[in-house]
Amino acid sequence: MLSNFIEIVGITDPGSVRQFNEDNVVYDPDDGVMVLADGMGGHRAGEVASRMATEIIIERLRTSVAEFGSSGDQHLPQLAVKQSINRANDAVFEAAEANPAYHGMGTTLVLAVFYDNRVTLAHVGDSRIYRLRNGRLELLTRDDSLLREQIELGMISAADARGSHNRNLVTRALGIEKQVSAHVREDEALPGDVFLLCSDGLNDLVEDADIELIMNALNSNLPLAAQHLVQLAKDNGGSDNVSVILAKVRKPFPAATRGTWIDRLLGWLLR
Amino acid sequence: MAKLVLSTSGTIVHQCFLDQERVSIGREASNHVVIDDPVVSREHAAIFQVGNDHVLSDLHSENGTFVNGVRVDRHILQHGDVVEFAAFNLRYLNPRASAESEMDRTILIPALSGSAGSGESAPTSPGFVAARSSRTHFPKGRVKIRGGARDGSIIELDRVVATFGKSGKQLAVVTRRPHGYFVTHVEGRRYPRVNQQMIGGEARLLRAGDVIEVADEQLTFLLD
């Protein structure tokens, strides 16, 4: 049970203005997998796209994770992540083709899979992954967005970006085209690390400095930290749906100790 | 659609829609917006469309480009902005480009460059796209501490959260919100006390003069 090693909490909220929530959040603490998606498309099709994507991906990943242990192949998590994203892309794309009400629907995506002291991270679109390590918050993803490109190309400064109306323009999304290329990376996951997956409803309204402050101050109470992040986004206007998943690494989780009867017994005794 | 209105001493002399990727402004007749004034350079400034934005760019003009009285090199135009050229005012009108119209739904567009095309993502510096600045007003609170290591000091509650007590033992958080300050239990077997009464798991609104007890600290809450 990975839940003895990694604590996970997730919240999704429609925000203060919108009637519907097109974000979706799913996670499984036992398998150490989490997925967050921010849907897009008219007539609430965004809700359908983000729900399809998160459900398909978590289902696939749970099945794959169960098979990791026996093989010892280090590339398995990345492979499983890519396969699950492709499967979700197929499903959303096909549903959009088949049903006129769903035409053009798609979704952003961020996910994390913890396995063998490492974490595999993936993203499409402008949802983000941050990591708090030794008290410092670091952004681990590059938004697939026009605004990020404008800044990187020197067209506008990061400070000027506050005045931009391009926040809603993403350059990549899942389910829009026949194929999607997700950004996938793998990293060490150290005890004490806290990973944050969020939709742009958080980082558009809450400064990174405040995210860092809350994650540090409330590190010992993860549900309260998640609740504070969402609450602050809403207090700052809450113009979009807000979703967060926090995952905190409590102790090392080498693959060998996972899933054995000793581990389960120890987990039970140490409960 | 966005619109430009050129006026001088209160009289409108020219109007046009921003329906091209690049709209030039200057003294020469070849410009889209012609301002016949010796203070204006032949090619003075241009407005580029990037996504939903119209970006005003000074073209190394002799006397500079001013928006609402401030000299700019490059500026993302906001609804109602006035660009000043000597005796002429060029007003930018686009209700969609106002701070209130942040309701736009996410839309997919093609990337600008090929740079974003590859699979692996690289780490970047934190916060390179800043959050929209919040116009929310927060009250100004502080606490006076008695007991513990910080005995006698006054702490300004000028950030969104501040924790008190001892981490690992008993910790409470004071949260600043638009409608007031709240205290919430964070960790420890014992809950903090407010005015000698133990609080539960929920956030509790603080009133001026409230006394919070957490670990070995006693905090008097003050509100301006």
Image: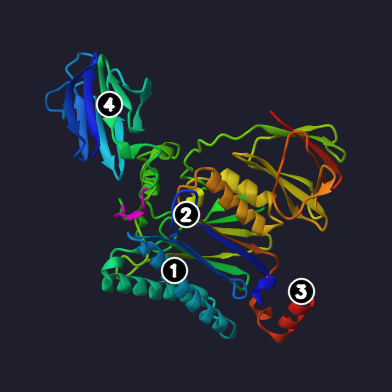
Chain on which label 3 sits: A
Mark 1, residues whose alpha carbon is within 10 Å: few (<14), some, or many (≥20)?
many
- Real-space Cα separation, disc 4 to disc 2, in angstroms: 34 Å
Q: Quadrant of the C terminus of chain B?
A: top right
Chain on which label 2 sits: A
The amino acid at mark 3 is Arg
Is residue B29 visible in the rendered image? The answer is: yes
Which numbered mark, 1 or 3, is in the foreground of this view? Answer: 1
Q: Position of residue A32 (x, y in %)?
A: 59, 72
Return the disc, 1 or 3, that comes first in the chain's sequence. 1
Residue range highlighted in magenta = B104-111
* Circle 2/circle 1 CB separation < 8 Å: no
Which numbered mark, 2 or 3, is in the foreground of this view? Answer: 2
| Marks 2/1 same chain | yes
* Circle 4/circle 1 CB separation < 8 Å: no
Which numbered mark, 4 or 2, is in the foreground of this view? Answer: 2
- Real-space Cα separation, disc 4 to disc 3, in angstroms: 67 Å
The amino acid at mark 1 is Arg
On the image, numbered disc 4 is attached to which residue? B91
On the image, numbered disc 3 is attached to which residue? A271
Give the main secondary structure, helix, strand or loop, of the magenta stretch.
Answer: loop
The amino acid at mark 4 is Arg
- Real-space Cα separation, disc 2 to disc 3, in angstroms: 35 Å
Mark 3, residues whose alpha carbon is within 10 Å: few (<14), some, or many (≥20)?
few
- Real-space Cα separation, disc 1 to disc 3, in angstroms: 33 Å
Q: Is residue A140 left or right of residue B34?
A: right
On the image, numbered disc 1 is attached to which residue? A51
Residue at 78% in and 34% down: B209
On the image, numbered disc 2 is attached to which residue? A241
- Real-space Cα separation, disc 4 to disc 1, in angstroms: 44 Å
